[in-house]
Image (cartoon, coloured by chain):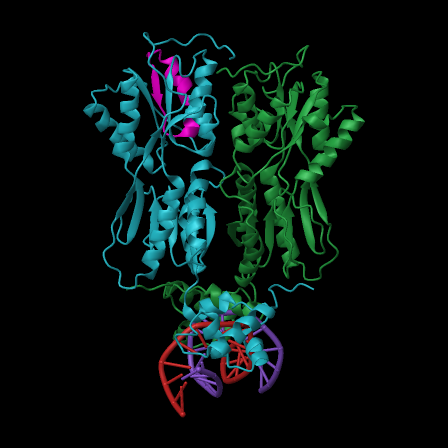
Chain colours: A green, B cyan, C purple, D red
Amino acid sequence: MGRRLLKSTSLKELSAILKLSQSTVSRVINGEGDKFRIARETQKRVLHGADVHGYSANTVARSLRQKRSYTVGVIVPEISEGYSTAVLSGIEDELLKDGYFYFVVSHRHRPDLLKGYPRMMLARAVEGIIAVDTAIEDELPVPVVSVSGHRHREGMVNIELDHDQAAHLALSHLKTLGHHRIAFIKGQAFSSDTNRRWRAIVETAKALEIAIHPQLVAQLQGMDPGPGPGMEVTRQLLQTNQPFTALLAFNDVTAMGAILALREAGLSVPKDISVVGFDDVLAASTYNPPLTTVRQPLRNMGQTAAATLLGLIRDETSHPHPAAITVYPNLVVRKSTAQAPAHAPHATTAAAV
Amino acid sequence: MGRRLLKSTSLKELSAILKLSQSTVSRVINGEGDKFRIARETQKRVLHGADVHGYSANTVARSLRQKRSYTVGVIVPEISEGYSTAVLSGIEDELLKDGYFYFVVSHRHRPDLLKGYPRMMLARAVEGIIAVDTAIEDELPVPVVSVSGHRHREGMVNIELDHDQAAHLALSHLKTLGHHRIAFIKGQAFSSDTNRRWRAIVETAKALEIAIHPQLVAQLQGMDPGPGPGMEVTRQLLQTNQPFTALLAFNDVTAMGAILALREAGLSVPKDISVVGFDDVLAASTYNPPLTTVRQPLRNMGQTAAATLLGLIRDETSHPHPAAITVYPNLVVRKSTAQAPAHAPHATTAAAV
DNA sequence: CTGAAAGCGCTTACAG
DNA sequence: CTGAAAGCGCTTACAG
C-alpha cells in the first residue's frame, strides 16, 4: 500500500494525548524546556510520551519553518575517482558528527550541470556548498567553500595546497637525483589546479636553476579521468625525440598512464626515466613501480572544508573570513624515481616488460 | 548577515507579478498546464516570468505538502573505495535524471552506525534506501534495494551477480591454462558476498573436477579496504609451502595485494603464478601486470538498483516484487594469467623486481 | 479555463 | 510558566 513517508505521530497528536499545547511539547522536544521554565514534571511527561509514541519531529516541516535544512551540497567533477572520493570521505567525517547530511552531485564537466546543480541544491535548501575541484561561476546566496577552487570571491573560502612548496618538493627531489632534462605534463584546462600549479613549477624551476624546455611541456586533453590522456600525451612527448630523464605528471593517474606509455616504448621506470606523481591516491602505493608522489592531504582537506563551511553557516555576523586556508604537501618517495642515467635514453621499439 | 536559504522569488511573488493566481502558476510550472487547459498564451507568460525572475519551487515546501521528499538514502561500507564508488556513480546517473537526490553515508562496519544511519535517513524523510554491500537488520517503512546484500526479506529486492557463472568463468579460464593447484582468498566475514561466492566456487570446482586443497584456502582479515590484507594472507599462503600455480582473489584490490606479496617472495606473475581478480575496478586495467579479472558491472548494478528503487517507490499497489535481480559477470583476460608452468614454483628469498 | 482557500507539520513571536 | 495563532511556501480539492 504505497505509503511514502513513515506515518509517525505528529506534534498535534502527541500534544492532544498529553493535553498540552503544541508549543510546550515542541519546546521540550527541542531541549528548550528549561529555557522556557517549563515544569520539570511536565518535561518528563513530554519526553516519556514522545518515547512511547515514537515521536520525532518531521524534519521537512521544521526545515520549512526554520528555513534551515541541516544539509549541505557537495559538487565534484567525478564520483568514481580517487581524488574526489578521498575528499568526500573527509567531508563526511566532519559533517555527520554535527548532524548534517549532504547531497553529492557530479558534473563531469558538463556546462549545463555545472550551472544547474548549484541551483538545484539551493532549491533543496542546502545551507552551504562545498565545491571540489570545480569553479562555481554564479554568486550564491549561501556560503561556499571550495577545495582547490582558485576563484577568490566574496564570502567564499578556498582550501588550497601550498603549490610552491609542492613544486619545490618535486623539483628539488629530481634535481638531487641529477635530472636536468625534465618533461612536464600539465593538467587539463578545466582543472582548477592547472594554472596555479604550473606557475609554481615555473617559478620554482627558475629558483632551482632547472631549465624548462618548451618541447618537453605537454598538456592533458579530454575529459577522461583515467590514465588514457596521460598515456597519450606521453607518447607524443616521446615522438618529439627530445631527450629527458624525468617526468613530472599532473597527478597520479596521469603518472600511471605515462609509465604505461614509457614501458610501451621499451623504457624502464625508474632506470631510464623517473616519474613523479601528484596527490598520492590509494592506488599510488600499490602501483608497479610504487609511485613517488607529492602527497596532498585530501581527506584532511575534506575535513577542513566541512568544518570551515559549518563555521560560516553558524556565523551570523559574517566577519571577514580568510579567503584561503592553506594545507601542506609532502613528498612520498617510492620506487618510480631514481638517479638520472648518464645519458638520456631513447625510446626503442615497443617491447613488453 | 547570516541568511541561510536563498531568498528567491516565491510563488506568491511571481503570481503577484504576473497577476495570476498561485494555482495557475504552480500548475504551469509543474507541467500540468495542458492538463488543466490553461491558455497557451498564459503558459508562455508563466514560463517566461519564472525564467526572468529565477523562480523555482521550494522543494521543502513541496515535500511537506506532497509528503514526498524526492530523496533516497544510500548506505555504503566505505566511500573512498573502488567498489562503492563505481556503484554510486551508477546510482547517481539514474536518480538525478528523475529529479531525485541522495544522501550518502558510510558505516565502515561500525555496528552503531549500521544501526543508526537508516533511522537518521528515515527522519530525513527519504523515500527509499539503497544498501551497497551491507546488510540492513531492521525492517524499514520504506522500500530497500540492496546491491549484493544476500538477505532476502519482505519488500526488499537484491541486485546480485550470478556467482555461479562468475566462478565458472574464473575457474574454467584457469583450468584451460593448465592450472591444477589453485589457491583461494575468501572475503572478510562481514562482506555480504563472501559466502555466496565461496559456495559457487566450491560447486563449480567440483563440476570442473578441480580439487580444492584446504591448505590453499585463506580468508581476508580486518577492515582495511586496501591491499594490505591481501598481501598479508598471501604471505601466509606462501609460508605453508604448499605449491600452487594460480590464485583466485576475492576482489581486485586483494589481487593487487597478492601480487605484491608474490613479487616480494621472488615469484613472477604470471610466469610463475597466475592471479585472477574480481570486480574490474578502474585500477585493474592499469595495474602491472594488468589484471585478469571477473568483471562485475558495478555501475550498471548501481543504475539498476536506483531504477528498481524508483519503481518500488512509485508502485502504489505493491505487487509482489522479484526478490532478486541478477546481473551477469564477464571475464576480462589481461596479463596476470598465463599457461601454468611445468612445475609449481617455490618462493625464493625476497628479490626486488 | 482560472481562482480562493485549506492545510502539510512544524516553530516562534506575541500575549497573558 | 503555558497557550492560541500566524506563517514558512507550496499543492490541490473544491467551486465556478
The residue sitting at 53% across, 54% down in the picture is A100
Please provide percent x and percent y for residue A224.
53, 38
**Is residue A264 placed above or below B316 in the rendered structure?**
above
Please provide percent x and percent y for residue A290.
55, 22
Q: In which image quadrant can residue A159 be found? A: top right
Residue A194 in sight from this viewpoint: yes
Q: Locate the N terminus of chain A and report the quarter of the image it occupies.
A: bottom left
How many numbered circles does the render carry? Answer: 0
Residue A21 in sight from this viewpoint: no
Please provide percent x and percent y for residue A296.
63, 35
The residue sitting at 43% across, 7% down in the picture is B348
Left-right relation of B41 to A17 = right
Toward the front, the furthest residue is A240
The residue sitting at 43% across, 13% down in the picture is B268
Residue B244 included in the magenta stretch of the image: yes
Please provide percent x and percent y for residue A262.
56, 21
Question: Which of B329 and A283 lies nearest the eye of the viewer?
Answer: B329
Residue B314 included in the magenta stretch of the image: no
**Is residue B7 placed above or below A77 in the rendered structure?**
below
Left-right relation of A279 to B273 = right
Q: In which image quadrant can residue B8 be found? A: bottom right
**Is residue B9 placed above or below A122 in the rendered structure?**
below
The residue sitting at 52% across, 81% down in the picture is B20
Left-right relation of B144 to B284 = left
Question: Which region shows up in magenta?
Answer: B233-254
Question: Which of B83 and A189 lies nearest the eye of the viewer?
Answer: A189
